[in-house]
Image (tube, rainbow, N blue to C red):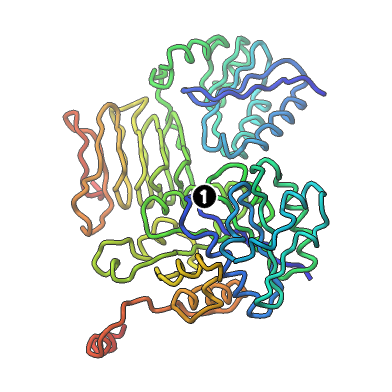
Amino acid sequence: MAPERVIIKGTSNGIIVTIGAGNWKTILRQLAQKLEQRSSFFKGGRVAVAVGERLLNEEELEALGVLLAEHHMTLWAVYSNAPDTQAAAKALGLEAEPANAPAVAQKTGRAARTPPTEPTENVTTIRRTLRSGQTVESLGNVVVIGDVNPGAVIKAGGYVIIWGNLRGTVYAGAVSPENAFVAALELKPVQLIIGDAIARAPADERRRTIIPEIAFVQDGQIVAEAWRKK
Amino acid sequence: MAGKVVTITSGKGGVGKTTTTANLSAALAIAGKKVVAIDADIGLRNLDVVMGLENRIVYDLVDVVEGTCRLKQALIRDKRVEGLYLIPAAQTRDKTAVSPEDMIALCDELRQEFDFILIDSPAGIEQGFKNAMSPADRVLIVTTPEISAVRDADRIIGLLEAAGKGPGDLIINRLRADMVQRGDMLDISDVVDVLAIKLIGVIPDDESIIISTNKGVPVIFENNSRASTAFKNISRRLNGEDVPFLNLQPEASFFQKLARFWNGG
């Protein structure tokens, strides 16, 4: 039996994959196996990898990101003590922090809300319907081509655009609330949070005409208006 | 011959999975197919009761999987129609007694001999659901026109897609046309709109189902109620036939029909 070199842990700050010593290929294989077994559990999650002192180049990190993406997970951060690895992670547009960061983040549980120094302009695109129980998290912006059903959750650092019906829950502007908005062909969310403002879809109107709408924060309150060219 | 494995599931309990399995199995057998229904709800077995075969159980699914008996010994033949068999669930064990690999192996063996293998999935999304899902070639998702059932169906469809089992086909059960007309119940388009998968059948709410369930005689053997016609139509669609959907409107008066005709509907 090969020793366990890969530990996957779910935390309030997303999934953290801790990688021990050993051959990188073997480790990727072990990770793939673990993801295979529990893929539905982790699906849609965002992942930070803690690699300790290990030296990783861009190619190796990219392979890791692709593997995670194949299992519908998004790599967003690398915790490492090696400056070269940190540099490689930054070159790929990932968050890079010292290896002891996750422990701190876990304790305080606040890391998700701490804005990084520069807001990312990454866009995560989802080309399917998000169904109940499925979650998408991104430090950047999120675009969904499809519906977002009740019970599905999107958490985005920036804006969220849904080319479809929004009936689920959206948190937008977790990182950069200033310019965050939520737009959908039909805006009927269970709950909408933009920055610190929270709103629900009005319950009364059952059969109003459906128009694309855009929601944003004005004077600390969420307002929605017709979504058209300005 | 390579039989087709069809799993009937729902997420939420009590929406009519077992009744649907019993009636579709019977309908397919009546149509001349060789059919076996498997109750995957280990520990809470029901299908045998609904099919009226409870008193004939000697061996069950777990016995087959554990090798206590031969597969043939666990097949209970339904004497009411040629070619209908049941493999009951064990009542004394739980879902962990069987693994997805066991189910795949079992179904591969059954495929040699049967045209259709229908699996009655337990409610929930845990081990029992995974067991029922793993061998499926096709999945039927049963829901009722209630928000909670639709929500669970949505979750199930998401899990199916993740497992590469396709989105599945939708059965809407217990629809009450009068309530829909009054706006007190979700209608078909409300449900299909959210779930966005193919509809394979709509079964009207029908008292005769409760009566037949209590008697252990699937309604399809008994009468020509609209529910039994709906089940027959689904079985024909499973067979690849193109069958128009039933008109589930409440009986209209002559003048209403005339007006509908005028309006082109």
Q: Could you tell me which quadrant the C terminus of chain B lies in?
A: bottom left
Q: Is residue B90 left or right of residue B145?
A: right
Label 1 residue SS: helix
Q: Whole-percent x and y of residue B74? A: 76, 59
Residue A86, image x, y percentages: 58, 16
Mark 1 is surrounded, within 10 Å at the Cα level, by few (under 14), some (14 to 19) or many (20 or more) other residues, namely: many
Question: On the image, which quarter does residue B39 sit in?
Answer: bottom right
Which residue is at 28% across, 52% downward? A212
Q: Nearer the viewer, residue A67 or A4?
A: A4
Does residue A130 lie above or below A109 as drawn? below
Is the residue B222 above or below the residue A43 in the image? below
Which of these two is toward me, B227 or B237?
B227
Q: Residue at x 25, y 30 (%)?
A: A197
User: Would residue B50 be found to the left or right of residue B135 on screen?
Assistant: left
Q: Amino acid at mark 1?
A: Ile
Which residue corresponds to mark 1? B156
| Residue at point 59%, 75% (across, down) | B27
Q: Position of residue A178 (x, y in %)?
A: 28, 27
